[in-house]
Structures are given as structure tokens and as C-alpha cells.
Image: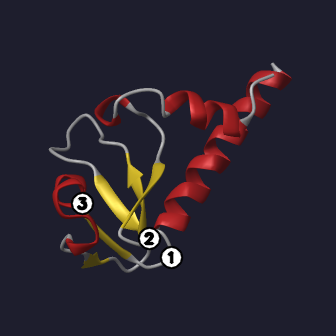
Amino acid sequence: MMTVDALFADDRRNPPPERSLPWEETRGGVTVVVEPKPHWAEDMTAFRLSDRAYCYYADWTANGPRARFFRHPETSGETVMAKARAMVAREIVGRWRS
């Protein structure tokens, strides 16, 4: 049976625009969680790991910690990652039970 960590590692083998699960990136001492791009979005979103703020991935890629971050009332990178890990875990359990 595949583990949550193994599925995340497997997804990271894809180039960023082709990933379907969030991942962490660190630059200049700032860590963000990058949320994969939905089919309708122009760019991906990067949420600061422990802070409720986000920026656009293109800005993060170009400017790292100097990217323009915007406040977000509900979501931090930790939240994005926790929700994704829980979703993957439910999928694994659902397949195992089937």
C-alpha cells in the first residue's frame, strides 16, 4: 500500500505546473506551501507556511522572500498542507477498504 509521504514524493517528481499536490519551497529563510494550479487559474498560489498570507507563484519564483504577499483571513501554508494530506489519507483508506 502506498503511503501519504510516498504519494507526495511521487507528485514532486513532476514539474511544478504538472503537480496535483501542494509542496514546500524555501528561499531566503521564508518557507511557503505552493498550491497547485487549478485548470482555470493563470498562476499558482504560494502561502507562507506559518502565516496567513499568500503571493502568486510567478512572483515567488522571481523574487523569493521579497514577493508581494497579501493577507488571507483563513489560510496558511500549514492549513493547505494539512488539508491535502488529510484528503490523500482518506483516498488511501477508501481504496484499501474497497
User: Which mark lies nearer to you, 1 or 2?
Assistant: 1
Q: CA distance from mark 3 to mark 2?
A: 17 Å
Question: Measuring 29% from the left and 34% from the top, which residue is drawn there?
Answer: 17
**Quick check: 60 above or below 52?**
above
Q: Amino acid at mark 2?
A: Thr
Instruction: Identify the disc placed on residue 73.
Output: none
Instruction: Identify the disc placed on residue 60.
Output: 3
Q: Secondary structure at mark 1?
A: loop
Q: CA distance from mark 3 to mark 1?
A: 16 Å
Question: Looking at the image, is mark 3 or mark 1 earlier in the sequence?
Answer: 1
Q: Secondary structure at mark 3?
A: helix
The quadrant where residue 29 appears: bottom left
Work out whether residue 68 or residue 41 is closer to the camera in this orientation and state it.
68
Question: Measuring 19% from the left and 47% from the top, which residue is drawn there?
Answer: 43
Q: Residues within 10 Å of mark 1 (few under 14, many from 20)?
A: some
The quadrant where residue 97 appears: top right
Question: Which quarter of the figure is the C terminus placed in?
Answer: top right
Q: Residues within 10 Å of mark 2 (few under 14, many from 20)?
A: some
- Horizontal side of residue 98 vs 8, given as left or right: right
Question: Which quarter of the figure is the N terminus placed in?
Answer: top right
Q: Given contact means CB atoms under 8 Å apart, are the residues at marks 3 and 1 in contact?
A: no
Where is mark 2, residue-wise?
Answer: 75
User: Which mark lies nearer to you, 3 or 1?
Assistant: 3
**Quick check: 87 above or below 79?**
above
* Residue 94 picture location, percent across and down: 75, 29
Q: CA distance from mark 1 to mark 2?
A: 9 Å
Q: Amino acid at mark 3?
A: Trp
Q: Amino acid at mark 1?
A: Ser
Work out whether residue 28 or residue 41 is closer to the camera in this orientation and state it.
28
